[in-house]
């Protein structure tokens, strides 16, 4: 798995993931907040399988 997410993309994914995940504990307390695990994990790992399928890469090219 090659990193295909840039720094800004990763930071936004982590923020959105944590925000959605917080819905499980505060606010409407809905289990739909667990959807936040997806952007959180992809942001932490730096790899998005959907980006790979679509040929998208927001990471800077080396060199």
Image: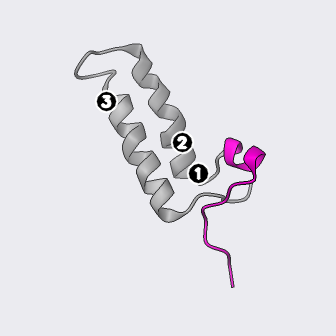
58 falls in the magenta region: yes
Mark seen at residue 45: 1
51 falls in the magenta region: yes
Disc 1 element: helix
Residue 30 at what x, y percent from top left?
35, 14
Residue at the disc numbered 2? 41
Residue reaching furthest left? 27
Q: How many circles with numbers are drawn on the protein?
A: 3
Mark seen at residue 10: none
Residue at the disc numbered 3? 22
- The crowd level at tag 3 (other Cα within 10 Å; few <14, some 14-19, many 20+) is some
Q: Which residues are magenta?
A: 49-63
Residue lying at 61% horizontally and 65% vertically, measured from the top left: 59
Residue lying at 37% horizontally and 38% vertically, measured from the top left: 18
* Callout 2–callout 1 Cβ contact below 8 Å: yes
- Marks 3 and 1 sit apart, C-alpha to C-alpha, by 20 Å
* Callout 2–callout 3 Cβ contact below 8 Å: no
- Marks 2 and 1 sit apart, C-alpha to C-alpha, by 6 Å
Residue 53 at what x, y percent from top left?
77, 44
Residue lying at 23% horizontally and 23% vertically, measured from the top left: 26
Which of the pair 22/4 is nearer the observer? 4
Is 13 located above or below residue 36 in the figure? below
């Amino acid at each position: 798995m090659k990193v295909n997410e840039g720094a800004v993309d990763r930071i936004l994914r982590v923020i959105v993931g944590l925000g959605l995940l917080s819905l499980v504990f505060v606010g409407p307390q809905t289990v739909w907040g667990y959807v936040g695990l997806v952007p959180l994990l992809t942001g932490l790992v730096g790899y998005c399988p959907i980006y790979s399928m679509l040929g998208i890469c927001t990471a800077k090219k080396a060199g």
